[in-house]
Image: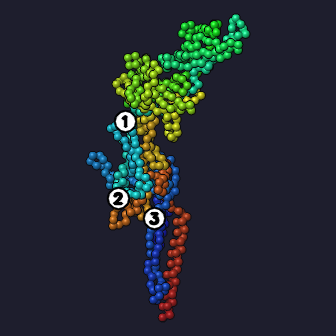
Amino acid sequence: MNYQNAIDVTGNNSANTSTAGFKASRVTFKSTFESMLSGLGSNSVGHGVGINTIDRDMSPGMIENTDVYSDLAITGEGFFIVGAYDSGEDGSLLKKDLYLTRVGKFDVLANQELVQGDLGLSLVGLPSDYDINDPNADIIPKNLPSIQEMLNMTAQQKAEYIDGLKPLELAKFSILKPKPSSKLDFFGTLNSLSGFDPMTFELTSASDPEVSYKVRFTFSRETQDLENFFSSEKSYTWKAEVIEWPSDTLKPSISPSTDQLVVSENGEILSLNNSVPDILSLDIGGEVFSLNKADFQSRANYTLPQTTSYTNIFDSKGKEQVLPVGFEKLSTGKWLFRPSADNPEIASISFVGDNGTYPVNDPLNPSKDMYRGLIDFTEGGYVSSVKLMDVEGNVIEDTPSKIIVQYLDGSEQEIELNFSAENNSGTSQALTLAAVPSSVLYNQNNGRPVGTLINISFDAQGNVIGKYSNQYNAVLARIPLIQLRSPEQLRPSQQYSAAYEFDPFPDQNTFNESSNLTGIFRSGEAGTGLIQTSALEYSNVNVAREMTKLIMYQRAMQLNARVITTADTILQEAAQLKR
């Protein structure tokens, strides 16, 4: 009878070789009792065999890919938590019982609830925080306690923590509300060599061809040129200096030694001076020499000292608004920048510093600039300070850390400015100055339009990730895993196949699940194993081992049968001797 029970166990194992999450059982035997043949302890004989235990082998089974995105398998020794819930009168879920399972065959229902497909039990985990009544709310993932924090908890504290977990109902994440942009991160390069390179002309005397002068022109932007900033035409102050002259004379004077030059956006010289724009007459040592625009144009090596970066910010309604930001070189290592209200829905833009608010444009005359940002760069090309400058060239010792964008509908938003941004991998992407073409980029942070949840995915860390129609991804919940000291002690549920009864609250009188509980961890921690997506764990039955057991049981039964027939033969001979 005992061997028949063992064969039944082996038969059950063999029948479930393809059952998801099935754990094989094994039979151990014991001697029923022994009788003493004499008073010596070594002279004893056994009388039969009995089943000692039927143990469950909780080692992981084979994992197979299923191509179903919501199928999850655990590569280690952890367990999913699932629960049976009833609906309360107010529509809330009331917990009945918790169970542990290795079968990660989950379905996403129409109400975005995650349930175990075979059992109908809700997957229990850690939903993210999201206040649907807050128009600017973000989806904020929750974190499990660290490994050490969990191990330091008492059994009661662990039970209370597990009891506080919720079924993963994701309906509240179906719509992601819009949010205004709150930060602009600038990165890229500004061309340190932009503007005019110096020009040198050799001028020969008309009265004496042996006499010539070399005149060097340098170009700079002065504070009196600020009104021409961020416009299509640029004004430069040129300075002329005689750098070579006949050796037998003193260095001659030159007049005029400075004036204004105007250039178009594409580098065409429009004016050489303020008196006769097309001709520049220079008095060198009492002799007049003439240069024209063509002479300057032929030697001009000009790079536009201006660049504009465009990006879209989001207002409080989630609508995209174009916000151009222009950068223009003032002098070596100094650049001005200005956000532009060149948008039909934007009324005005102001800088916000520690000491006040500074409008970019005159409220009474929007075409007139009032304040610009001033960026100072170090010799190495990094931002050293950000200040303000008015159109008269006065530097305001205040850092414009933010801007306020006011819209025609009366709404406004505050946006932080950051010139030392970091990308998603944590690498610095600060705005720098270099001898390369200007390329300034900037990203808006936190802003988004309204989004609809279009699909759900899972990762190896147990994160439930929602993808929205507005290209926004968010962690909607975390799936924790239970780790047990002795998984073999679990009691199979009589109601749900492939599920084990689980009561986390401690019982001081008996060994129960709380005594067996190591803790609840993030997947991959404390030996729980990572979560493999689009896969299921199948039976851990070893077919070869089961066949070997059948042979062993068969031979053992044959041997026992031979013992019985041999004993019967001996008795028969004894009976014949008596007769």
Considering the image in quadrants, where does the N terminus appear?
Answer: bottom left
Farthest residue to the top: give it. 207
- Identified at 55% across, 13% down, the residue is 259
Residue at (52%, 50%) from the top-left corner? 65
Front: mark 1 or 3: 1
Indicate whether 497 appears above or below 221: below
Q: Report x, y in % for residue 286.
A: 63, 7
Which disc is residue 156 wearing? 2
Q: Quadrant of residue 363?
A: top left
SS for dot 2? helix
Q: CA distance from mark 2 to mark 3?
A: 28 Å
Q: Secondary structure at mark 3?
A: strand
Q: Earlier in the sequence, mark 1 or mark 3?
A: 3
User: Does any portion of residue 319 appear in the rendered image?
Assistant: no
Horizontal side of 517 relative to 539 (left or right) equals: left
Helix, strand or loop at disc 1? loop
Numbered mark located on residue 451 in the image? none
